[in-house]
Amino acid sequence: EGLLALEAAHMTGDFLAFYAAARLLAGPRPSQLYDLSSQQALEQSLAVHSNVAFQPFGYPPLFAFVLKPLAFQPYQTAFFAYVAVMLLVLGASLWTLRVHLPALCGSRARFATTALLVAGFHPVVRTVIGGQTSGLSLSLWLGFFAALHGGRPGLAGIWLGLLSYKPQLALLLGGALLVRREYRALVVAACVAVAHYLLAAFALGW
């Protein structure tokens, strides 16, 4: 299957791995999701640029299930749909800032300034419109912060458990919960994180 010619940055970013994972999961043998040779062969068949580097998919299975609807769209359509969702998620994250950080966002002028500083920060712009997961990670982090700030440790644990799709971020916040002795949130987060892999085992084979 050929692809429309896209910028090299669109082809070499993480989105190629995301799209390949979605295609593998939607295919006749979803158990090949973490087979590196299958991932690489599919990515090579999709790429129109001969110099596209192999991007292995190493995220937990739940993220692949979220990506699965992209498999039924052409690559270019799926890419722009993914970027649109990340932009919406970023907007929701900024709105969360407005509610929970009154010192920075207590007025319209302050909120506009903070939103522009966050959305205009080059690493944020580059990753959100470049097919990365920064918008999603930020929204989960802020959901965790909002729940904890609002005195809802169980909900904070759910957000943190979902954030375990990027373990390095979840471990950092988990350590902060341990220092704060937020044991209920830690237990809930651990249960949600384990559910990632139980879901995978049920759907893809033990």
Image (tube, helix red, strand yellow):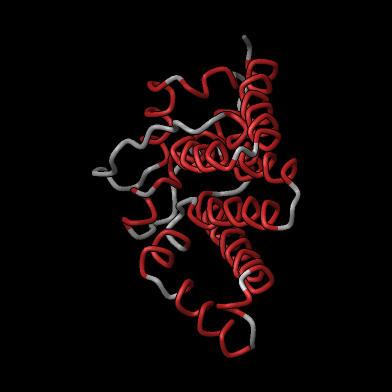
Q: Is residue 73 visible?
A: yes
Q: Nearer the viewer, residue 65 or 75?
A: 65
Q: Is residue 71 left or right of residue 173?
A: right
Rendered residue at 63%/28% (across/down): 190
Percent across and percent down for residue 122 are 36, 69
**Residue 180: which quarter of the image?**
top right
**In the visual, does 206 lie left or right of 167?**
right
Residue 26: tell me if it is visible: no
Q: Quadrant of residue 143?
A: bottom right
Q: Residue at x 52, y 54 (%)?
A: 79
Percent position (x, y) of residue 144? 63, 50
Instruction: Farthest residue to the left: give it.
Output: 51
- Quadrant in which the C terminus is drawn: top right
Q: Is residue 110 above or below residue 168?
A: below
Q: Nearer the viewer, residue 192 or 124?
A: 192
Q: Position of residue 11 (x, y in %)?
A: 37, 50
Q: Residue at x 62, y 55 (%)?
A: 145
Residue at 63% from the left image edge and 36% from the top image edge: 161
| Residue 129 in the image: above or below residue 204 | below
Q: Is residue 163 left or right of residue 57?
A: right
